[in-house]
Image: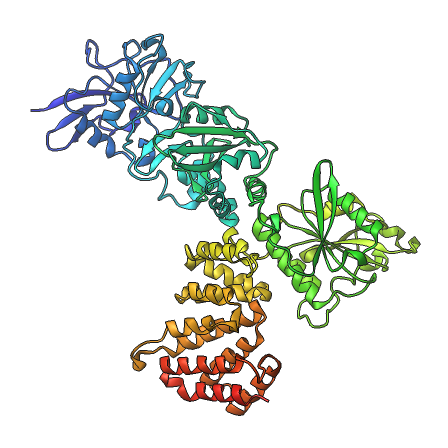
Amino acid sequence: MTTTLPLLGLGLSDLCGDGRTVVGETALLLLNEPPRSGDTRVLARDPGLSMPAVSQFSLVDLAPGAALVRRFLELRPVESLDRLVETRPPAEPTDLVSLAERADLLGVPVQTRASNLPANREAKPPLAAHRVIDLDDSGTMTAPGTGDVVRVVPTRSLISRPPFADQPDEAMAIIAAKPYLSGRIAFVDHGVELGLPARLVDNAHAEALRRHGIDDVVRGLDGRFDEVFGLAGVAGEALDGYVDLLYRMERAPVGTHGLVAVEDGDDARVYLAVRDPNGVSVIDLGTSWAASLPTDPTRVSLAMLPESLTVAQRLDSLARAWVDPQRSGSRSGDRPAGVELFGWTSGDSPRAIEVIGSVADEPAGLMQKIAEAAEQIDQPVIVLGARRSGEAPQADQLMLLRERLEAFVGLNGQMPVVVTRGAEPDRPVAGSEATLVDILDLYQVSVLYQTPTPPAALGERGPGAGAGLLNLGNWWVLREPGEAGHTESADTLTPGLLARGAAPDRRPAFAVPSRSVSSFLTTPLSDLAALEASLDSIMANSSARRAEVQAAVARVPTKDAHGALVELAVLGQGEAALNVVRANGGRGDEIIEPLLNIGHPDPQAQDDNTFTEVLSQLATVAGEGLNDSVSQAILSSIAKLIAKTMTEPQLKVEIARHRDQLPREGHVRPDWVRRMNRLMRSWPAHQEILSWVAQAILECP
């Protein structure tokens, strides 16, 4: 026996071309034919509902079984199913609870004219604030309670996988250019999706999200989510629910950004809502991915963000606002020795310029000019100090500049502008393989430098070039990174000249590390609590973060002790390595603890490669991180002896170099001999080498 269930699609091409589709073994027959005269089972088309982005259909009844209808609908492509809505007859009285039950039964949204509902709409289904959507006749969202059409979405959608997940990248540009379904709210397995599907969100904003690492910033706010609006300088407004949120974002001008906080019991999450040209993207700032929101939140708050910014700029702005204000180094990490601050007050806000060198060496009038110019740009300014105009920087100044540029770029996504009275930036620097130009081009940073050379001789193309020979003083020349070279000059440092060197959208010539890596690298080894927390953050995603740390250490070798801590943690000796830092290197037996930990009861099963790797990394932590040259020399010598790159006589010479730190009196030498004896018991294969080291320590002159 065949049961017929008349079905009228308002887009008839959505169903099979022959008009009849048999589903399943029970032979449920779905008719997709023009209504025949006198057939009262087939619904008339509602001529008033013309919704271009929606595929509408109408079922006479569900008597043959909702499960069979669901099975039929599940056969549709997920991209089509995502736009599918059942439209009820134009004059069929109903209520919100009945519509919700029908939507839950079918697994697709169900809509009706508002005139079919009771005037007061007092009876509401569960989660009404997140699933009852008001629209106009064209299918565009209206304010809750004001629409000509009311749509209720199911609490469990038939959508089983993300729409467009299998579409090639080249097709996404075409798909993204078309308007998407207004009021899209989908309750799926992993939560609630608002606005554009995840693949379209990723297509629009992947580049900004992948480079930024704001998810690390948000994780750093754990326990302080009540501050996200205040720190960003906005006030959050409590909303009725997801429908209210989506409506406000859809009606906002294209380019609008909204900061969203959603509380789910004790849990809280932060999102960025973006009004894109053809819909709304909701981004989870804790994952840097399209949002999946809690099903039944306890609170939803929204604040429209000021200014017209790109998503990348917005992420930078939020990251700067959310950096933990309790960190002693504030927005750019902890300032190392050799970096001073020149501070002033702008309005009610304190401002500062970093000076690599001595503030006292810089002319007071010049620093004031730089401060006035710095107020015109929302970017940091670094002064590369010089004792005299035209003097080349020192090698350690260039290394500090690397550290500071790495910190600003990694922590904030900010691109500083460098100002210097020193030598022209391409001049070689004694003791440094890199020139100032090499460093600036790596980080894609502009420099404003002073020179007595007329701009015309530099090939400069900006205003003032023709008057260069008339200037008896020094010129200020702006050099932009890369091939742009010298682009502009003036006979005095002006805000306009500094502003033209600022380029907030410029990015370094390398992949910017995630914020967790930048935070770790700018944490001093003396801040043990912060160091341990940031190392834990690195190890939570060690495969990706380890590579980022290695790349950063290659750019800034002064951070190699941090890199060694990560390598020791990867080898399973993270806590033992932190104990070395706590004990300050060779002042305790902690220095050999990681080597004892990796010992194996069976000498035949011991791993020499791991032993020498741990030795090398411990030596780096001791020497470069803790300034413990004795421990560094001893551990490095053991590794070199094992690798046969050092002989016993060379060992004695190396140990003798540190005789001032190995006094004959006291316990220092006996303690080191005792440590060698402990290592011999754990690593008998290296007993001879370790005894050489113990003998060299005892015989040190």
Quarter the N terminus occupies: top left
Q: Which quarter of the figure has residue 315? A: top right
Tell me: residue 646, above or below residue 339. below
Q: Is residue 115 visible in this depiction of the protein?
A: yes
Q: Residue at x 38, y 30 (%)?
A: 297
The x and y percentages for residue 47 are 35, 13
Q: Which quarter of the figure has residue 295? A: top left
**Residue 148 left/right relative to 653:** left
The x and y percentages for residue 217 are 51, 46
Q: Nearer the viewer, residue 318 or 674?
A: 674
Q: Residue at x 61, y 48 (%)?
A: 330
Q: Nearer the viewer, residue 662 or 169?
A: 662
Looking at the image, the residue that sits furthest to the left is 1
**Residue 501 left/right relative to 133:** right
Q: Nearer the viewer, residue 425 or 455?
A: 425
Q: Is residue 508 visible in this depiction of the protein?
A: no
Tell me: residue 86, above or below residue 232. above
**Residue 239 left/right relative to 454:** left
Q: Residue at x 52, y 36 (%)?
A: 227
Tell me: residue 11, above or below residue 210. above
The x and y percentages for residue 76 are 27, 33
Q: Residue at x 25, y 18 (%)?
A: 34
